[in-house]
Amino acid sequence: MALDSVTKEIQASAEAAAARIREECDAEVRAINAKADAEIAGMKAKQDKRVTEAKEALARQERSSAELESKKLVLSKKKEVLAEAFESALAELENAPAKKKLEYYKAMVRSAKTVIDEPKALMSESDGFSAKELGVKSVEKDPRIRSGLILQSQDGTVEVDMQYRALLQGIWDKNLKQLSDILFG
C-alpha cells in the first residue's frame, strides 16, 4: 500500500502542478488577450481619429471648392454685367442722333487741336459730316472706323484716336474699380 499511496501522492502532486500550470497559462493567456485588446483599442482609436480628421479635411476641402466655384460663377456674372454695361454705353453713343454726334465730334476736334493745329478727320462711312461742320482741314471716310473720329496731322505723323470704343475703353479701364463698386457694392 505504500506504493499506492506514493503513486497517489505523485499523481495528486502532478495533477495539482498541472492545474497550477493551467491556471498560470490561463492567466497568461488572459493577460496577453487583455494587452492585445488594449493595443487593438488604441490602434482603433488612432485609426478612428485619422478617419475623423480625414473626413473633416475632405469636408473643408469640399466647402472650399464649392465656395471657390460659387465665387467664380459670381465673378463671371459680374464680368458679364460689366461687359453689357460697356456695350450698352457704346451703343448709346453710336446711335446718338446726328445733332448730338456733331456736338461730340466738335468737342473731340477742339480737344485734338491742342495737339494738332489743322487736323484732318477720319470717320465712319455712315457719318456724313463735312470738314466745315467739324472745323477740320479735311474729312476722309475709313471703313475701319465704326464710330467717333481719328484726327491726324496733315502729314500723318501725329494721330489722336477719338473713336468711341477707344475713348470709352480708356475711361472704363481708369474707372473699373469705381464702376465695380457702384454696380456691386
Image (cartoon, rainbow, N blue to C red):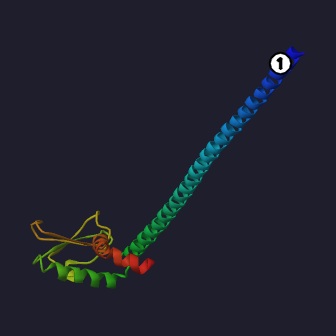
Residue at x 46% of width, y 64% of height: 76
* Residue bearing mark 1: 6
Q: Is residue 143 left or right of residue 21?
A: left
Q: What is the quadrant of the N terminus in the image?
A: top right
Query: Residue 14 lies in what quarter of the image?
Result: top right
Residue at x 45% of width, y 70% of height: 78
Task: List the single residue furthest toward the front.
Answer: 2
Residue at x 28% of width, y 85% of height: 103
Q: What is the quadrant of the C terminus in the image?
A: bottom left
Disc 1, SS: helix
The residue lying toward the viewer, choosing from 34 and 132, is 34
Q: Position of residue 21 (x, y in %)?
A: 73, 29
Count of numbered tags = 1
The residue lying toward the viewer, choosing from 164 and 51, is 51
Amino acid carrying label 1: it is Val
Residue 7 shows in the view = yes
Q: Position of residue 9 (x, y in %)?
A: 83, 22
Task: List the single residue furthest toward the right.
Answer: 1
Q: Is residue 85 left or right of residue 103?
A: right
The residue lying toward the viewer, choosing from 153 and 23, is 23
Q: Position of residue 38 (x, y in %)?
A: 64, 45
As drawn, 51 above or below 162: above
Residue 135 shows in the view = no
Q: Position of residue 126 (x, y in %)?
A: 33, 71
As drawn, 51 above or below 180: above
Q: Is residue 36 left or right of residue 77?
A: right
Query: Residue 171 lies in what quarter of the image?
Result: bottom left
Query: Dot 1: within a 10 Å radius of its alpha carbon, few (fewer than 14), some, or many (20 or more) residues?
Result: few
